[in-house]
Amino acid sequence: MDNRSDLLDEQLLNDVGNIARVTSTDGKVASYIPELSRMSAELFSLSCQPVGAKMIEIGDVGQFFTMQSLSKIISLAFAIEKFGRENVFRHAGMEASADSFNSLMRIEMTSSKPSNPFMNAGAIAVCSLICKAYKSEALDRVTDFLRLLTGEYNGFDEKVFLSEKNSADRNRALAYFMKSMGLLHGDVEEILDLYFTLCSLRCTSGTLARTAAVIASGGRSAASGEKVIEKETVCTLLGLMSTCGLYNESGEFAVRVGLPGKSGVSGGIMAVVPGRMGIGVFSPALDAKGNSVAGIRALELLSEKLDLRGIGI
Ligand code: GLU
């Protein structure tokens, strides 16, 4: 495979952005969390953090949005680092699922642990482990970890947090149901508060690129150059991102983009080019499966132009 990474510059990102951003009209900004619907569908930013080089980014680069499911990368990495892979995967599986991100069906049908830690049920189970170990310090521990990985912490969006907390009938149903099956331990509302707060963490596409670059570099922070996560954690994240990162659109993403990725319903996607770079893209309009339309298109174009398809999956 050619290494065309030297073609990466601002001009290339602008070309990709110009083609990709118009596709956002095919999508819809998420509204099931009412506060998310206030985001303009026209926003777009694309950031690339090459391993060992300077970030290159274009578009609405300073624009904050909330991490939503992108935070599941942070909570899962934190949990593997602190409790070990085996312990974490006692509470959530490692299998892709054809179900939507907030599906209840599988757990009820099989009475077993959630399919993987990127489904809402699996991420809530990971939050319960973190809550059990760190109690009232749980949130601070995870945000310290985010700072360690990316060199930044931008607080959380209280309006989005409250909006989700007050409209989370489905996640609440999932969590209480899991508790009734013995799959969740501790106070459900405390666990959900941690989950909603992590989903409300503020970030930019640059934050996503820096997070993805930690994984791309085998565990080093682009901000400090320090080794911040173990190879075991890196490989686990890559495996799950390749198979489950975009929920029931993971297969299509693997074919079209060909890189390990993770999305969130705020419209962000991060993608990893192992050994080369981390990529973050943001465009709030989503397709029917909850993934950013223009975000996927931008990653597809970038992957094509730099011949990245198939690296790491
Ligand atoms: N906070 C969102 C939820 O639980 C996250 C979903 C996502 O980003 O995919 O519904």
Image (cartoon, rainbow, N blue to C red):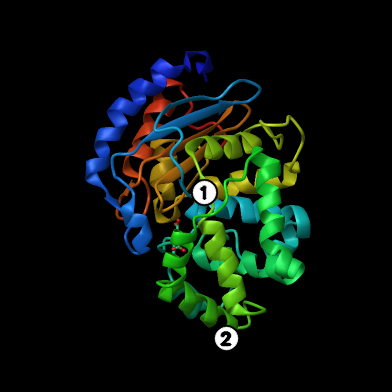
Quadrant in the rendering for residue 18: top left
Q: Residue at the spot x=53%, y=68% of the render? A: 121
Specify few, some or many for label 1: CA neighbours under 10 Å numbering under 14, 14-19, or 20 or more.
Answer: many
Q: Disc number at residue 202? A: 1
Residue 313 appears in the figure: no
Q: Position of residue 264 (x, y in %)?
A: 45, 51
Q: Residue at the spot x=34%, y=35% of the render? A: 297
Q: Position of residue 38 (x, y in %)?
A: 32, 53
Mark 1 to mark 2: distance in Å?
33 Å
Q: Disc number at residue 145? A: none
User: Residue lying farthest top?
Assistant: 6
Q: Is residue 254 above or below residue 61?
A: below
Mark toward the start of the polypeptide (1 vs 2):
2
Q: Residue at the spot x=44%, y=37% of the render? A: 281
Q: Position of residue 308 (x, y in %)?
A: 49, 27
Q: Is residue 18 left or right of residue 190?
A: left
Q: Is residue 120 left or right of residue 81?
A: left
Identify the image quadrant of the C terminus: top right
Q: Residue at the spot x=43%, y=39% of the render? A: 63
User: Residue lying farthest bottom?
Assistant: 180
Q: Nearer the viewer, residue 219 or 303?
A: 219
Q: Is residue 195 above or below residue 301?
A: below
Kindly state the secondary structure of the residue where label 2 is placed: helix
Q: Position of residue 23 (x, y in %)?
A: 25, 37
Residue with the mark numbered 2: 180
Q: Is residue 202 left or right of residue 40?
A: right
Q: How many marks?
A: 2
